[in-house]
Image: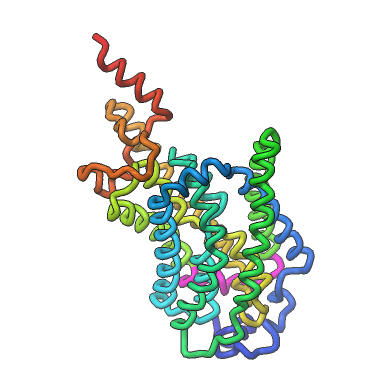
Amino acid sequence: MSSSHPCRSWRINHFSSPSLCPSTSCQALLPSLNVILIVVLLAIMVSLGCTMEIAKITTHLRRPKGVAIAILAQYSIMPLTAFILGKLFQLGTPESLAILICGCCPGGNLSNIFSLALRGDMNLSVVMTACSMVLAIGLMPLLLYLYSGGLSEVDLEGKVPYKGIITSLVLMLIPCATGIILNEKKPQYTGFITKAGMVMLLLSSAAIIALSVANMGSCIMVVLSPPLLGTSALMPLTGFLLAIEICNLFNLFSFRCRRTVCMETGCQNVQLGLAILKVAFAPEIIGPLYFFPLLYLLFQLGEGFLLILAFRIHDRIKQANGKYSLLSGVPECHLNRPTQYKSCSSFLSLAPESSAAAGRMASAALLP
């Protein structure tokens, strides 16, 4: 793409440009789409709250060491990964800001779904999501401030809307708290709300992608550039793998919990990142890069499904050979694991569907 392309007017040497792009196709989303985006995000946050139980949260918080290590993995790996990839691919400041926003976002529904598919510890998954949402109010602006200082020599003072980001995060806690209250007071409705939220997540993502592509026109090629495609592919994969190693380093988690931390670290709430980029940032600052979180979502889905597929294949091989690890069904994340389970390959060690199933297998093995 030529440097004279109108969609490049928002790049770092044109931060003061009064307009993003002369072409109306490169302008921000229509106001109606902004409303749709916010409404969908609120509905998703309510469904996320419906998966949380106060009793489960307090149980983990009474023994917070495991949760603390999990939160450390999430808020250390992903922002640092985003910053390093921005430097590695020599991205401009707007692109680096976009990937930093995604890297600093808390977890969301997608990580809960993947944790369930990988037979992870759902209690830990829910607690991590809840804690990361609350901590994001302070950590997300702080991390963005720290890392944005190393993006370039250009003065970003007044360009990054920290107040708007904090306001958006606080407002997102309201529907999440509403979902928690509904789960406590009206649990008979929460199943439907959660399923509706998952369906809305998938449908809205597809709709927003289609409408955004139609609205941006040729500017979509800015987001589909090789450096941003490479960043989108490497960020979740790096989060998945490094989270496993952090669990191994501290030797704190059972296999179920390691899988959970892996998913929670590599999957961010991209709908929240999209809303922040679209609503909080001025168009001349972020340009068409508000579309980047949706590109990132596609790679999260693809790599997450590949990881689940690898686990399922490993599951069937072990099942055929009769090699089940009864220890992998232990849900307590605070237990220290034996040294022989510290290799990264233990991440794929099997967990039976329940401890009862494991007991039946053990009993059958002892019978003549």
**What secondary structure predominates along the stretch shown in magenta?**
helix
How many numbered discs sit on the rendered protein?
0
Q: How is the image coloured?
A: rainbow
Closer-to-camera residue (143/96) = 143
**Furthest residue to the left?**
340
Q: Is residue 277 above or below residue 71?
A: below
Name which quarter of the figure residue 341 lies in: top left
The residue depicted at 41 percent of the width and 77 percent of the height is: 87
Determine if residue 138 is in view.
Answer: yes
What is the quadrant of the N terminus in the image? bottom right
Q: Position of residue 60 (x, y in %)?
A: 46, 46
* Magenta segment includes 219: yes
The residue depicted at 30 percent of the width and 21 percent of the height is: 362
Determine if residue 262 is in view.
Answer: no
Q: Is residue 327 above or below residue 50?
A: above
Closer-to-camera residue (201/184) = 184
The residue depicted at 44 percent of the width and 57 percent of the height is: 71
Q: Position of residue 57 (x, y in %)?
A: 52, 46
What is the quadrant of the C terminus in the image? top left
Q: Start and end of the magenta stretch?
A: 214-228
Closer-to-camera residue (219/337) = 337
**Furthest residue to the right?**
32
The residue depicted at 66 percent of the width and 47 percent of the height is: 179
**Furthest residue to the front?**
62
Q: Position of residue 335 (x, y in %)?
A: 32, 43
Question: Is 249 positioned to the left or the right of 288 in the image?
Answer: left
Question: Is 274 positioned to the left or the right of 58 in the image?
Answer: right
* Magenta segment includes 256: no
